[in-house]
Amino acid sequence: MSVRPPEGPDALAERVGAALRRRGVVLATAESCTGGWLAQAITSVAGSSEWFDRGYVTYSNGAKGEMLGVRDETLRKHGAVSEETAREMAAGALARSRAGIAVAITGVAGPSGGTAEKPVGTVCFAWARSDGTPQTETRRFAGDREGVRRQSVVVALAGLLRRLEAER
């Protein structure tokens, strides 16, 4: 029995694109620690303009509020790296786009910035549909800054694919 190697961002983006196209659903992204890497992987797929509306890179707390409507109270109470913030980022991306599904990523890529509660490698995700309740998840990744960011993009895309395939 052969084990399938883990897929990289570009291969996953192709599969996400095919699933979105089949369902006639459009995607929006909201990124913090990945700095646009998710949108880059998506737009590397030829024809992605059919199923990708826009991506928000909201690195600062101010940008999260201004561009996505993340509430100051959420940031004060839970921090930028939280499932609550990721949820509001995804909801904001949906509300401010033509998308039917959105994914958000916010985390601590390192090498500094971590705390005992949220060490380097802590990344929060949210997936939201215009017709459903957002789903969130927190992961802790090992590795350097690039590794944490890459793993985050892979998890975001794999999460999209799982949610789309569950709709069959």
Image (cartoon, grey):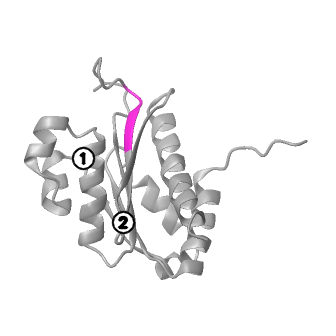
Give the extent of the magenta segment: 120-124
Q: Earlier in the sequence, mark 2 or mark 1?
A: 1
Above or below for 167 versus 154: below
Instruction: Give the label on residue 132, or none.
Output: 2
- Is 121 included in the stretch rendered in magenta? yes
Between 22 and 141, the one lying in front of the other is: 22
Where 121 sits versus 134, above or below?
Answer: above
Query: Mainly helix, strand or loop, the magenta region?
Result: strand
Q: Mark 1 is on which residue type?
A: Thr
Q: Quadrant of the N terminus?
A: top right
As shown in the figure, which amino acid type bears the numbered disc 2?
Gly
Mark nearer the viewer, 2 or 1: 2
Q: Residues within 10 Å of mark 2 (few under 14, many from 20)?
A: few
Mark linked to residue 85: 1
Instruction: Name the residue rendered at 45%, 56% in the picture.
Output: 38
Residue 124 x/y as whole percent: 36, 41
